[in-house]
């Protein structure tokens, strides 16, 4: 389902394809940076975390938590712990 008309979608696609691959990659990188900043702000507000390690763990779980099995997530998180 989409609320975008076919004409508008076609125009948007044409505009995006007119950009160079480098420009499209730069746009994607900026969008991902913005998304990470929004996720970080939400985590800080929701959980009131102070330490950068806690924020890193929560961000990993929010962004990539569904991409890994529980055992894999535990391995990744444990690998970040300082001994």
Image (cartoon, rainbow, N blue to C red):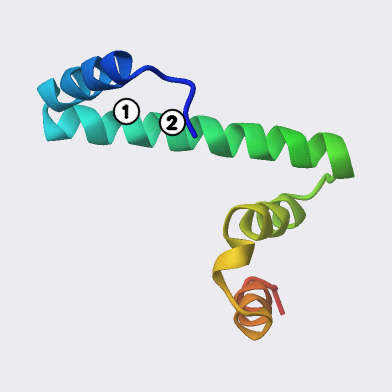
How far across and how far down the image is residue 82, in percent?
Answer: 69, 73
Q: Are marks 1 and 2 in contact (CB under 8 Å)?
A: yes
State the residue lying farthest toward the bottom.
71
Query: Which image quarter: residue 26?
Result: top left
Q: Is residue 30 left or right of residue 71?
A: left
Q: Establish if 25 lies above or below 6.
A: below
- The alpha-carbon separation of the residues under discs 1 and 2 comes to 6 Å
Q: Between residue 76 and residue 5, name the one nearer to us.
A: 5
For the residue carrying disc 2, how many other residues have a C-alpha within 10 Å: few (<14), some (14-19), or many (20+)? few
54 over 4 or under it: above or below: below
Left or right: residue 5 versus residue 60 is: left
Percent of width and height locating residue 44? 79, 38
Number of disc labels: 2
The residue sitting at 72% across, 55% down in the picture is 58
Please provide percent x and percent y for residue 48. 88, 41
Q: Which quarter of the figure has residue 13? A: top left
Element at label 1 = helix
Indicate the position of residue 27 as horizontal and vertical percent values: 32, 28
Q: Quadrant of the C terminus?
A: bottom right
Q: Which labelled disc corresponds to residue 27?
A: 1
Binning the other alpha carbons within 10 Å of mark 1 as few (below 14), some (14 to 19) or many (20 upward) gives: few
* Residue carrying label 2: 31
The residue closer to the viewer here, 20 or 43, is: 20
Residue at screen point 46% across, 37% down: 32
The quadrant holding residue 68 is: bottom right
Where disc 2 sits, the SS reads helix
């Amino acid at each position: 389902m989409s609320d975008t008309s076919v004409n508008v979608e076609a125009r948007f696609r044409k505009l995006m394809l007119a950009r160079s691959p480098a420009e499209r990659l730069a746009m994607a990188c900026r969008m991902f940076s913005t998304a990470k900043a929004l996720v970080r702000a939400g985590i800080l507000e929701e959980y009131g975390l102070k330490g950068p390690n806690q924020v890193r763990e929560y961000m990993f779980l929010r962004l990539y938590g569904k991409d890994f099995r529980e055992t894999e997530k535990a391995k990744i998180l444990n690998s970040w712990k300082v001994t």
